[in-house]
Image: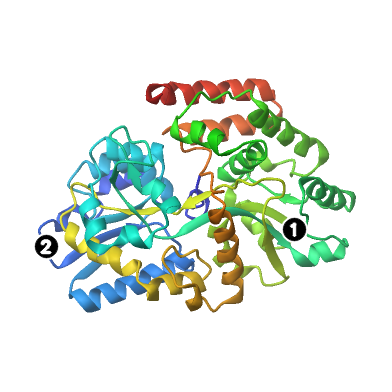
């Protein structure tokens, strides 16, 4: 699940993408001096800042021109199979990682096997093994092995953002156990404050659901769910606890009564403006909070009570099979992995995958990177809940909305999720 579903929700409609032919994409095939590039990072995001600088360097060093088009995450996700299977495909684009996204396109023959380029440029030596999982896919499109179909350009993980001023006003300390976390939530409710920023229309609620399940899970549970290594029981202790706990969160007032109708942008803004003191979400918000959450002191802490956290390598640079200039695409990828660009990414609030930590001088950025490294070092990255099937995201959003609206019971929701999951995953076991 991913932030761009919220931060770039105003992107052009998917139908328009196909109909207009996406000027500057496939039409430049054969033009050795033009690289067509798509990504969906906000201009003031850490990645957007870093990629802008990478484009400048690329043009200076190669003499080629970059034709960049900003796309929305949903815009790319919903039309990728159609566009990449046409002469409108760009030379390089940012794309979501996971079985149901990059893995699906790889299995359909729409992405270039870039293993040779990876080895030639030494990108595999720059990326930690845990970060390579989502870059490689077998012939069925299952991540973790096989050829390279993408190169991660940053890292990401879900953490707990908290308003330090709001905590201090209630005399609260950062919780280190789940019981202490619940006590913090209760304290805010007792003070008439809804503690958790949340959004049921998009990814945040599903990420909270998965994080609650991870409290009762281990690495094999994750591998069974994400990599199809074994049977998955959606009525086990982990999933049952997660579903029942979300209902309790509603009953106890931890979530807003209208959370099911809110989008991720709404949740993020409620943290930025100080109305919600806690937001469980991804590192992709960090750079924006540095810019906009300036009226109070804030920080982060790991979700208490779990050794596993949502997270992975970030989205990837992928090269469509129909790319006109793949060699230029490889040159651009290489520039984005340079220490200079990775340091800029880190000092702008992002999570670099190939930076020298000594180059990260911003104190807040160091906090974010240290948190990611701690989770990565203990093999704690557990990916995202919607990855196992191409349509699981939509099902998860719809079912969890009904859960917190109490139009479905936890058992009914879990049964629906299991049916959706098995309709796809059963073929890979």
Identify which residue is drawn at 29% across, 47% down. Answer: 149
Vertical arrangement, residue 199 with respect to residue 217, above or below? below
Identify which residue is drawn at 40% across, 36% down. Answer: 100
Identify residue for label 2: 31
Vertical arrangement, residue 365 with respect to residue 250, above or below? below
Query: In the rendered image, which quarter is residue 248 located in?
Result: top right
Q: Residues within 10 Å of mark 1 (few under 14, many from 20)?
A: some
Identify residue for label 1: 275
Q: Position of residue 77 (x, y in %)?
A: 38, 43
Considering the image in quadrants, where does the C terminus appear? Answer: top left
Foreground pick, 412 / 117:
117
Foreground pick, 329 / 260:
329
Residue 13 in sight in this render: no
Residue 7 in sight in this render: yes
Q: Position of residue 152 (x, y in %)?
A: 38, 56
Query: In the rendered image, which quarter is residue 109 located in?
Result: top left
């Amino acid at each position: 699940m991913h932030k761009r579903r919220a931060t770039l929700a105003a992107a052009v409609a998917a139908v328009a993408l196909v109909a207009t032919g996406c000027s500057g994409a496939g039409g430049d095939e054969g033009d050795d001096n033009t690289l067509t590039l798509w990504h969906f990072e906000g201009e003031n995001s850490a990645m957007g800042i870093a990629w802008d600088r990478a484009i400048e360097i690329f043009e200076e060093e190669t003499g080629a021109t970059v034709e960049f088009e900003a796309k929305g995450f949903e815009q790319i996700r919903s039309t990728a199979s159609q566009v990449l299977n046409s002469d409108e495909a760009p030379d390089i684009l940012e794309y979501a990682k996971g079985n149901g996204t990059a893995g699906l396109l790889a299995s359909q023959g729409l992405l270039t096997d870039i293993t040779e380029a990876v080895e030639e440029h030494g990108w595999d030596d720059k990326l930690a093994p845990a970060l390579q999982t989502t870059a490689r896919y077998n012939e069925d499109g299952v991540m973790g092995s096989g050829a390279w179909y993408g190169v991660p350009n940053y890292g990401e993980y879900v953490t707990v953002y908290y308003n330090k001023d709001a905590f201090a006003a209630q005399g609260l300390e950062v919780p280190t156990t789940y019981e202490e976390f619940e006590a913090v939530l209760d304290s805010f409710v007792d003070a008439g404050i809804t503690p958790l920023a949340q959004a049921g229309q998009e990814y945040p609620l599903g990420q909270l659901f998965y994080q609650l399940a991870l409290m009762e899970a281990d690495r094999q549970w994750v591998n069974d769910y994400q990599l199809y290594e074994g049977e998955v029981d959606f009525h086990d202790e982990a999933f049952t606890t997660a579903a029942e706990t979300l209902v309790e969160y509603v009953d106890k007032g931890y979530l807003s009564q209208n959370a099911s109708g809110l989008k991720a942008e709404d949740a993020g803004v409620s943290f930025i403006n100080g109305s919600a003191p806690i937001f469980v979400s991804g590192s992709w918000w960090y750079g924006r909070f540095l810019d906009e959450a300036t009226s109070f002191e804030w920080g982060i802490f790991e979700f208490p009570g779990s050794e596993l956290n949502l997270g992975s390598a970030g989205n990837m640079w992928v090269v469509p099979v129909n790319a006109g200039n793949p060699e230029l695409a490889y040159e651009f990828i290489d520039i984005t992995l340079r220490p200079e660009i990775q340091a800029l990414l880190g000092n702008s609030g992002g999570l670099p995958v190939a930076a020298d930590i000594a180059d990260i001088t911003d104190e807040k950025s160091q906090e974010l990177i240290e948190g990611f490294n701690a989770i990565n070092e203990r093999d704690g990255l557990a990916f995202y809940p919607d990855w196992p099937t191409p349509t699981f995201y939509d099902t998860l959003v719809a079912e969890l909305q009904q859960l917190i609206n109490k139009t479905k019971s936890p058992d009914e929701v879990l049964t629906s999720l299991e049916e959706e999951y098995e309709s796809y995953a059963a073929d890979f076991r």
